[in-house]
Image (spheres, rainbow, N blue to C red):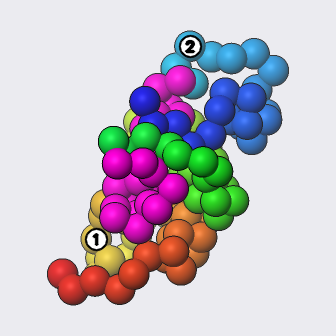
Amino acid sequence: MRRLVNIDEAKRHLRYDEEPPELDLLIEMASDAVLNYLGEDATFLDENGQVDGVVPFAVKAACLIWLGEMDKNREGQQEAPLPAQFGYGYPPAAVVALLYPLRDPRMA
């Protein structure tokens, strides 16, 4: 499993006293989403795609923010829909702000 944050970090961020049964799944989902966004630029992964060493602070923070969004909007709804020109499928703005500087520019 490729987890960018641990249970204790997630519980603190989400302000949980007890660990809900779905927290493990939420951590995996948020971690996968961040890693998918970073793609090949996730240089802290080993050749098998597992976390190797220290996860950069910006990556950990982005994972926690995305985790919070997933926890808050469990059914996938959004409080403020994205403008039509941006479409859907993009990370929350704060996550992009943290991760974008870590990505190399790409052509679509």
Q: Earlier in the sequence, mark 1 or mark 2?
A: 2
Q: At 63% across and 16% down in the image, what residue appears?
A: 20
Which is more toward the observer, 103 or 10?
A: 103
Q: Position of residue 38 (x, y in %)?
A: 41, 64
Amino acid of disc 1: Gly
Q: Is 18 placed above or below 38 here?
A: above
In-image side of 19 versus 91 (left or right): right
In-image side of 16 versus 54 (left or right): right
- Please name the residue that numbered disc 2 is placed on: 21
Which is more toward the observer, 16 or 3?
A: 3
Q: At 61% across and 52% down in the image, what residue appears?
A: 55
Q: Are marks 1 and 2 in contact (CB under 8 Å)?
A: no
Q: Residues within 10 Å of mark 2 (few under 14, many from 20)?
A: few
Of all residues, the one furthest to the left in this rendering is 108
Q: At 53% across and 69% down in the image, what residue appears?
A: 99
Residue 15 appears in which quarter of the rendering? top right
Q: Quadrant of the N terminus?
A: top left
Q: Which mark is residue 106?
A: none
In-image side of 21 versus 75 (left or right): right
Residue 30 on the magenta segment: yes
Amino acid of disc 2: Pro
Q: Which mark is residue 87?
A: 1
Residues at marks 1 and 2, CA–CA distance in whole angstroms? 32 Å
Q: Is 78 placed above or below 22 here?
A: below
Residue 104 appears in which quarter of the rendering? bottom left
Which is more toward the observer, 30 or 50?
A: 50
Q: Which residues are magenta?
A: 24-47
